[in-house]
Image (cartoon, rainbow, N blue to C red):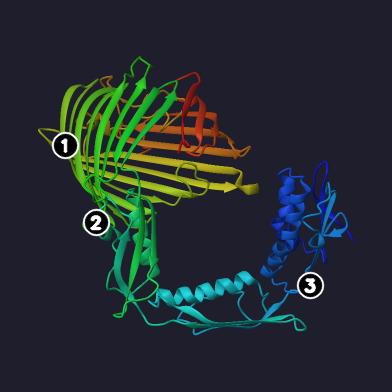
Amino acid sequence: MFFNTLQANAQTRIGLSVKGGNSDLREEIIGVLSTRSLLVEGETAPQGLIAAAQADYRRIVAALYSEGYYGPVVSIRVDGREASELSPFAVPPRVGRINVIVDPGPQFRFGRAEITPLAPRTELPEGFRTGEPAKVPVIEEAGTAAVDRWRELGYAKTEATSQRITASHPARRLDVSVGLNPGRKLRFGRLIPTGNQRVRTDRIIEIAGLPTGEQFHPDEVDKASTRLQRTGAFRSVTLTEKLVANPDGTLDINAELVEAQRRRLGLGVELTTLEGATVSAFWLHRNLFGGAERLRFDGEISNIGIGGDNGVDYSLSVLYGRPGTFNPDTDLYIRTALKHEDEPLYLSDSFEIEGGVTRIVNEEYKFQAGLGLLYSHTEDDIGIRDFTLFTLPFSGTLDRRDSDLDPKNGYYLNVEATPFVGLDGSGSGARLYADARGYRSFGTQEKFTLAGRLQLGSIVGTDVTETVPDFLFYSGGGGTVRGQPYQSLGITLPGGEEVGGRSFLGASVELRGQVSEKIQVVGFYDFGLISADSMPGQGGESHAGAGIGVRYQTGLGPIRLDVATPVGGDTGDGVELYIGIGQAF
């Protein structure tokens, strides 16, 4: 009998022999061996190894059953003795060799495979039919699919009333017959919250939006749970159905809640050699008036310690949010902000107030619309000017990334449109912006990730001299072109004035490679083009930067270190350093 050694150390070796040489089955068995896991961890104590070997009989048989082998013979020999016969009170001083011998026997196939009654349009797994391998997971999947379909039609208390599984060893056949009782069709009853101490019960019911009186559907329970979780007011949310329906055909839902801490404080730091240090902080109150309202103060000081044309910027904003306003998937927000921006091409002091709604269509797509008032006092090469604008900001986000901070696959799209009406002689027009990002991982265990980003921006309806400088577009720095000085690229007017452009085209590409569990290396190239025309890419000047980076994975996301240098355009030279948290995009 031939054994392949799976694991070895100075004291103990373990080998596996599978009759028939089925490689897929062999991998399944290797994956469940607790003896191998102990040896991988460096365990050599005989008592622990023998106990693991005795437990492996059941684990191996369960793995074989899951693949349709219902007549296996399993032998585990510890230094030549069957593990099942070893006494825990007479443990040898050491274990030198563990041999696992498996004869899986024949694979059984389905003879009879039926579940009755089935709801209309029930989709059972392809493998659950006569002649297919009789795998346990397929049986479980079929039963779950049948019950779930009845539940989707309102029969919340569907249950299996009979289950008969018979194995015929001579015929190598497994007969499966399951009987279901859908019960009666039910409607949603009350949502009954428990565990809430500060959030009012009436607001919990309003935010959850459980459709009381309507036909039961499990998706509505999931939606109600998600709505409560995204308020941030609860540390945990568990929605469960009452065991027994009400006499009137309604089914109450219990909501077991654990409230989160009411207040939270956060601090962030980012550093680049071109833009200096950025320090930000926020203070959050999660349940302001007892209705899961959020009040958040954000403060930021940036461009610290760099001097030159780029002075210190600071901002303070206050955001109030009320979930479940107008309907369960619409949140109300009111935001105010004060900003002082000392940028290379302009100096600005501004105040903004905005109110609107955020509509959550689903967990991937949401949009926001509001009304705002912006006042800005600016100074640039054109002169000192005041702007007063009435704004109608709109934005939509589609996020299908597998992670916010470190995406491996998927894509992200954000579109913004801000029409503005000038007051007191200011110009009227609109600011448009789009940000598209895509991610694709490949290679063994997806160790390599190709990431791309495209940014487009445009000002329509006003000339650069009539547009508030903060609305114009600039290129250079960590958010656009790494390696180029911050906001170093704009446009030059016929009179020699340097200002922002009416359009922006930015593109970035990164190749990320995982070299260890914690370390990732990155190569990147960034490109930016600013134009006086409102059509992105129409004329104008461009620059580019490239470099390499390192990411160190933490529980809060990757710590980012990028080194970049200009590779196109004439707005910068030298090598620049960027440090932050999370991927660059």
Please report whichever mark, 3 or 2, sits nearer to the chain's N-terminal start.
3
- Residue at 19 percent across and 31 percent down: it is 351
Residue type, mark 3 in image: Gly
Q: Is residue 153 left or right of residue 355?
A: right
According to the image, label 1 marks what residue? 389
Relative to 577, say whether 317 is above or below: below
Q: CA distance from mark 3 to mark 1?
A: 79 Å
Q: Secondary structure at mark 2?
A: helix
Please state which of residues 84 and 136 is positioned toward the viewer in this rendering: 84
| Residue sitting at the far right | 1
Please state which of residues 557 and 567 is positioned toward the viewer in this rendering: 557
Please state which of residues 568 and 314 is positioned toward the viewer in this rendering: 314
Q: Are marks 3 and 2 in contact (CB under 8 Å)?
A: no
Please report whichever mark, 2 or 1, sits nearer to the chain's N-terminal start.
2
- Residue at 47 percent across and 19 percent down: it is 573
Quadrant showing the C terminus: top left
Q: Secondary structure at mark 1?
A: strand
According to the image, label 2 marks what residue? 203
Residue type, mark 1 in image: Leu
